[in-house]
Amino acid sequence: MSKKILILAGDGIGPEIVAEAIKVLEAVRAPFGLDLTLDEALVGGAAYDASGHPLPEETLAAARAADAVLLGAVGGPKWEPLPIAVRPEKGLLGLRAGLGLFANLRPAILCPQLADASSLKPELVAGLDILIVRELTGGIYFGEPRGVTRLESGERRGVNTLVYTESEIRRICRVAFDVARQRNKRVCSVDKANVLECTELWREVATEVGRDYPDVALSHMYVDNAAMQLVRAPKQFDVMVTTNMFGDILSDAAAMLTGSIGMLPSASLNAEGQGMYEPIHGSAPDIAGKGIANPLATILSVAMMLRYSLHEAAAAQAIEDAVSRVLDQGLRTGDIMSPGMRQVGTVEMGDAVVAALASAG
Ligand code: IPM
Ligand code: MG
């Protein structure tokens, strides 16, 4: 049966990088016998401009009907003055909530060819391979009450709520332990259990889940220490599992260790294995339309999509190998450029990956 893929290019560099990712997806279609139907819809600022809402009803319906969603990026200065409720980011949060995408997998892997690009010394990051498992549909991002109100005194008061149920914690911890089994069998659960009761519960539930995985080593770390350890000795980590907001922050830090936020894909999965795939970088409005953005994170997101939602591991591997060969050839976009390499633009990079796929036969 044909698998439905919904393409949401979004804003900024989104359309440019997604175009290259589609080119790569098209290139593996015939060789791997993939039966795919590609559809497109609007999200983020582009959707707001067209319809007055960052997540139109028809986009959410199309996403629900799809086997997988490929997203570029959303947001930009143009929409920053808008009220939070209709900002482009709400489109993204609405997709996460609307599809129940509670499990966000954010790998931070150092490509050996890019070791010099890290902000840390090469010996601290050589071979780095961390997977951050971020809870994505709960916690302070979605907790109620929320908002800004005016007190009787006239002073304004802002509130957001950190809330997790046991079952929300349990299911994300299970995802972390399950993937750890396929990796180096270590899970570090990150919380702030010394201060926040909600994450004290997080720690208790993580420990309970851990009992079902005696073959996986579980450790716990406070988030402030985890941030420090990530920049001190990042190779101590295998899988990290944490709340929505801690995961947001730690995954940016981990990404920077690889020196190339333009290289990192991500997957957001629901209980049915349906997923949304996107680069972890943003819409980069400063370079949008210039044809210089790095499309590799989006291309690698296609590989993740093939692996996790479409169960086409061979096609996924072929794409990852092709990206690696293109880096071996010395091709670099501006963000990962280093002396002696050849700088290319977005389209040329996409073409090179397609060519590398073809030459692999
Ligand atoms: C991310 C982003 C989003 C988040 C924003 C754009 C809403 O920072 O995916 O990490 O905070 O989750
Ligand atoms: Mg973020």
Image: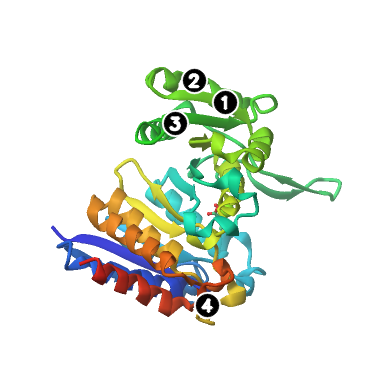
Q: Which amino acid does the dot numbered 3 rest on?
A: Cys
- Mark whose residue sits in front, 2 or 1: 1
**Residue at x-position 31% and y-position 61%:** 319
> Which of the marked residues, 4 or 3, is nearer the chain's N terminus?
3
Q: Is residue 75 left or right of residue 232?
A: left
Tags 2 and 1 touching, CB below 8 Å: yes
Q: Earlier in the sequence, mark 2 or mark 3?
A: 3
Residue for badge 3: 173
Q: Nearer the viewer, mark 1 or mark 3?
A: 1
Percent coordinates x, y for residue 192 in the rendering: 65, 30
Residue labelled with disc 4 = 292
Indicate the quadrant where residue 209 lies: top left
Is label 1 or label 4 in front?
Answer: 4
Residue at numbered disc 1 = 220
- From the viewer's side, name the closer residue of 164 and 114: 114
- CB contact under 8 Å: marks 1 and 3: no
Q: Does the residue tagged 2 have its C-beta within 8 Å of any atom of ligand 1?
A: no
From mark 4 to mark 3, how far is it between C-alphas? 38 Å
Task: Please name which of the two marks, 4 or 3, marks the residue nearer to the observer.
Answer: 4
108 vs 303, left or right, is right
